[in-house]
Image (spheres, helix red, strand yellow):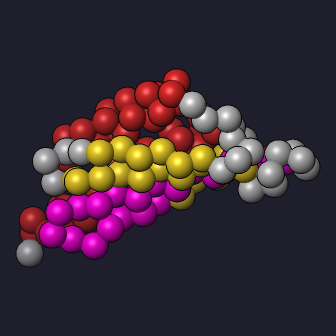
Amino acid sequence: MIVQVHTSPDVEGGERLNTEVEALVASAVGRFAERISRVQVHLGDQNSGAKGGGNDKRCMMEARIDGAAPVAVTELAATIEQALNGAADKLERTIDSHLGRQRDK
């Protein structure tokens, strides 16, 4: 499973962030790794950092599941870390539900 991290210019990225995101994704959806070819993680600041604000940090995760349509989730939160954790939880639940429905067919 490949994890790709994309950040908007107003989010401080780097190797440390990439490593943390890869570990978070692996722990959230690792049990599905044989069915997932790639997970793309997009991080951004809705207000571009200038205005500040409440839940303006955005994390969108999209998983490419073998033999199925991609699954995407989005989480808005006060910090990038909270957005990442929320999106990872949503992605795990969504993939579990999606694969469960396929198994039931």
Outermost residue toward the right? Answer: 51
Say whether residue 103 is magenta. Answer: no
Q: Nearer the viewer, residue 24 or 100?
A: 24
Quarter of the image for residue 10 reads: top right
User: Where does residue 58 sit, x and y in percent of width and height?
Assistant: 64, 52
Q: Which stretch appears magenta?
A: 53-73
Q: Residue at x 67, y 35 (%)?
A: 12
Quadrant assignment for the C terminus: bottom left
Q: Residue at x 32, y 33 (%)?
A: 27
Q: Nearer the viewer, residue 30 or 92?
A: 30
User: Where does residue 78 sit, x and y in percent of width and height?
Assistant: 72, 41
Q: Is residue 57 left or right of residue 39?
A: right
User: Where does residue 15 sit, x and y in percent of width and height?
Assistant: 51, 27
Q: Residue at x 46, y 28 (%)?
A: 20
Q: Nearer the viewer, residue 69 or 100?
A: 69
Quarter of the image for residue 30 reads: top left
Q: Residue at x 37, y 30 (%)?
A: 23
Say whether residue 54 is magenta. Answer: yes
Q: Is residue 105 visible?
A: yes
Q: Is residue 55 visible?
A: no
Q: Nearer the viewer, residue 77 or 67?
A: 67
